[in-house]
Image: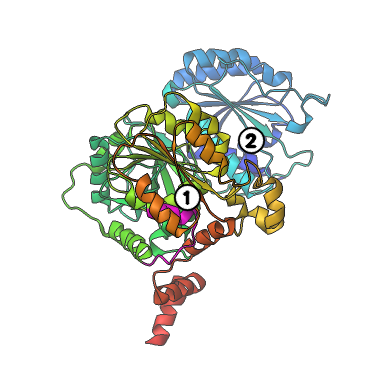
Amino acid sequence: MSYYYSTNINVQLMIALLKEHGIKKVIASPGTTNLEFIASLQHDSFFELYSCVDERSAAYMACGLAAETGEPVVITCTEATASRNYYSGMTEAYHRKLPILAVTGLHAYSGVGHLEPQVIDRSVSPKDAMRRKINLPAIKDESDYKESELLINTAILELKRNGGGPVHINMPWAGPKFDFSVQNLPKVRVIKRYTIADELPELKHGKIVVVVGSHGEWSEKQTAALDRFCAKYDAAVFCDHGSKYYGKYRVLTSMIVFQKLNYDILQGIDVVIHIGEEIGDDNLSRKIRAAKETWRVSLDGEIRDTFKNITKIFEMGETQFFSTYAGEVTEEKNTYYLACREVADKLNANLPKLPFSSVYVASKISARLPENSVIHFGVSDTIRAWSFFELPDSVRTSSNLGCRGIDGCVSALIGASFADGNKLYFGVVGDLTFFYDMNSLGNRHIRKNLRLVIVNNDGGNIFRRNGHPSQVWLGFEEANKYIAAAGHFGRRSPDFVKNYAENLGFEYLTASNYGEFDTAVKRFTTPEMTDKPMLFEIFTESKDDSNAFEIMANVDLDTKGHAKAVLKQVLGEKGMETLRKIIK
């Protein structure tokens, strides 16, 4: 009877990625839950298989083989005490930094703790027996497929990382029916890690984007290295207000990616270079996932698959990476950057009138911020609204984008303001964010350099925006009760925050319409240091805030451009070419 690879997708992915990473040595111990894996390996002549009944001995054999050859060695067995017997050899491998990959079968994670035969709890292992433990999902859909593919890559890369060591993978079986009818392995995404000591892969010229997530302050050397890189590869740097990059190739993309239309500058991206941490704008993450691949550059060397297409990790500093790839720049290229700037500039030039809203507030205060000041943004809709608009070049930004929680935004602003009493520190938050953290305003160390905006629309307005699941499924009134959490904290009382702030020594300003805002904002943004810290409470209506975001999602370049973009989305490139011929 002919047999090939198992229909178990995890088995196929495991074998395909072992081959792509050049791992061929396997020591197999008998068992049922790893049967699909072993039998599939037997079919493939690429692998060099050895048999060992005793798992304890198999693990030590792998240590000897790996130490002698310098190559990773796979050991595989079934579950229960068979897998426990690997611990002695795995501990030896850990202390000697030997690349041993233990692949153990199991019936199902759901069976743990329910007295099922041979099912044991392997969720915790000795710290010095393995560098990492991986639990592969039972694959039911594409999301599970991608997760398993990513996890297997992660495990294999860990074998050699920072000196190397053993790794453990739990792999669910697909029994009791065994089917070995698959003749070809799937095409898999291979992820590789590089250090500065390695021969780095070639970066071919094409459409290249550098995406900067939340980032610390940039040094002149860092900025210069990135600018040289962009000049050589005709790249653009996509930013939001958490990025803090202000070099020559900066493009504030929030307005562009928030549009319902998809622009050419976002299509056909060859490589995304991802630096920094979490990205403040979810729309950017979604809009560029069609890029062919992502290269992640970070000193931590971890796999951060933000765009779901990572292929390479560079465990090195950003300056090292950009300087190495840029080399000597003989000709400055900026065609792609200028195309991005053109889209951004035309969108900004065509902004329609906005209702009195959080977006309107951002549009007006952003340009008025005093030189050399600092502004902290609340998360979610707050930073989203402000990232539509550029700030003065000397203004620096910050936001709690690490976890994107609302619980400490005001406290973080206050802490930052302690750093320099001669510099103005602004902050802008929504009402829920403010009331969550309002006790921090009573801190006795607060100085007169602090200025805080509260946009009060009575609740978490992101949950009341058009298109949000709470609106689609519940509607405005039902979402207001428990999702948007309206009606707390004085129900937009004109006196509650005013009295609280003034009793704590703040100068209080307020506005509920365009005229009141225009008067108060002049005082709030004065560059002079005032006698007291300031709190500016702005009352907006929820529906106006929602409508403002809807307006910002439909700012078109022009009628012709709109029509052309829609046609292109419907017809595609080939269809557009046919249409041009017909018109001619």
Q: Which class describes the residues within 10 Å of circle 2: few (<14), some (14-19), or many (20+)?
A: some
Residue 150 position within the rendered picture, expressed as x and y whole percent measured from the top left:
54, 39
Taking the spot 25% from the left edge, 45% from the top edge, the residue there is: 227
The reply to whether residue 316 is visible in this rendering is yes
Q: Is residue 298 above or below residue 565?
A: above
Q: Is residue 188 above or below residue 92?
A: below
Q: Which residue is mark 1?
A: 384
Quadrant position of residue 162: top left
Closer to us: 402 or 206:
402
Whether 253 is among the magenta residues is no
Taking the spot 64% from the left edge, 35% from the top edge, the residue there is: 136
Question: Reading the chain from its start, which is encountered first: label 1 or label 2?
Answer: 2
**Furthest-left residue in view?**
330
Closer to us: 377 or 141:
377
Residue 181 position within the rendered picture, expressed as x and y whole percent measured from the top left:
69, 48
Location of the C terminus by quadrant is bottom left
Q: Is residue 421 left or right of residue 20?
A: left
Q: Is residue 108 above or below residue 457?
A: above
Closer to us: 283 or 141:
283
The reply to whether residue 409 is visible in this rendering is no
Q: Is residue 305 left or right of residue 2?
A: left
Which mark, by number, is residue 136?
2
Closer to us: 474 or 482:
482
Quadrant position of residue 475: bottom right
Q: Rounded to the nearest whole Å, what is the CA distance between mark 1 and mark 2?
A: 35 Å
Magenta residues (range): 350-364
Identify the amino acid type marked 2: Leu
